[in-house]
Image (cartoon, grey):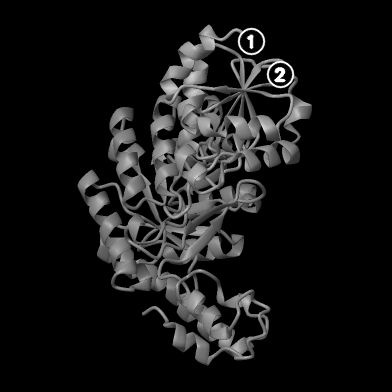
Amino acid sequence: MALKGLDIFKLLPKTNCKKCGNPTCMAFAMKVAQGGITIDKCPDISAEALAQLSEASAPPMKALTIGAGDKVYKLGGETVLFRHDKTFVSKSLYAVTVCQDCVDEKLPKIKAVDYERIGERMIVDLINVEFSGDKAKFLDTVKKAQGAARTLILEVSDADAAKAALDLVKAEKPILNGANESNWEAFNKIATEAGVVLGVTGKDLDVIYDTVQKLEGAGNKNLVIDVGSVSIKDAFANAVQIRRAALKDQDRSFGYPSIVNLSKLAKGDDVLQTALASVFTLKYGSIIILSNMSYAQALPLYGLRQNIYTDPQKPMKMEPKIYPVNGADENSICAITVDFALSYFVINGELERSGVPVNLIVSDAGGYSVLTSWAAGKFSAGTISKFFKESGVEGKVKSRNLLIPGKVAVLKGELEENLPGWKILVGPNEAVGVVKYLKDFKG
């Protein structure tokens, strides 16, 4: 049961010291209850109260960390079943499975998928290394996969092979996926000693539940649950039931992130795996394993993930700066737009289609669209000229032709006053008209 603000307030020092950044202890307590701040932000809370509240205010789904260095990922920590209720916390991670016979062929393809979208680098997050019965070949495959600089999942049910593999890569904090009702004690010992997250599976949910409870009884709560590979229908039902049990029924034995292995559920069918990956991105795959990942698969999947795992209360923004388009140099015409991601991609696509070199200047407008930010005073002659000065635009480009969106043509006069030396050009109202405008433009 989630704690109420008043329950939290009773255990706070009630000094209203403001060290946490809130005006009163009651305001702090209400934010903790809403999940907006963690209880440890109170510097004067007693150790006893901190321990009591930390356990009680923890999300019903445990938050875990895997990986090391620049490949650290968060799993779990979800508090709602539906994104529109609040927001999802930890994005689904995509993995590609490799085996001893295919690792050399797949690793270059895994590394080939690497691009940036709205400030986020898109790569294959994890590599799942399958054990096929030969310990020596499995270890050789693990070594090769380690060279791809990705966090690994060791999918192995043989304790000796698991321990030997972890001896090679435990510093990189992989996931050991292989505990079941018959080997959980041995795997718990191996995973605990190596300090890694342990994957738990079983023939059905009852068996998985019992195994998880045994592991919890042994003190291990760094777990992920493999939803199984009996059938697509069962895997989907398991993923949904596990999440509902954790968040709706507050059953913490199911409050762990999940693994969905589509390379087994739809073996040999990359198209079906991609379609299913989109389904499990929505409900509720924490780690989704595919046989392959090409750009044709990655573009829709990563785009979907980025849309789902963003806070709906915060607009998706581009970094305010100059984006050269079509090989633009310092003498190319400049165009300006706002930092709302959708506005950027619409105008950037049309600029690319024109084939004309353009320096697209993205101004800080609070993440709003052109008209909304203009109406809110965040995309005005004053804010644009301020952005030009603070970001040093005039020192980065020599062209003094600035194309503004036609819908804010009213800014032309003020901009000419605020940006002396610049020729302000009013573009078409719709982005699609920019192509003809630029092709006809005689600078």
Q: Position of residue 441 (x, y in %)?
A: 56, 10
Give the quadrant of the C terminus: top right
Task: Give the left or right position of residue 382, taking residue 183 as reference.
Answer: right
Residue, x 39% and y 72% (percent of image)? 214
Give the quadrant of the N terminus: bottom left
> Residue 414's image quarter?
top right
Q: Position of residue 322 (x, y in %)?
A: 65, 30
Q: Is residue 365 visible?
A: yes
Give the residue type at disc 1: Gly
Task: Give the left or right position of residue 365, taking residue 186 as reference.
Answer: right
Q: Residues within 10 Å of mark 1 (few under 14, many from 20)?
A: few
* Viewer-closest of 391 and 379: 379
User: Disc number at residue 355?
Assistant: none
The residue to which callout 2 is attached is 399
The residue to which callout 1 is attached is 443
Residue, x 51% and y 92% (percent of image)? 10
* Viewer-closest of 110 and 106: 110
Dot 1 or dot 2: first in sequence order is 2
Residue, x 36% and y 46% (percent of image)? 281
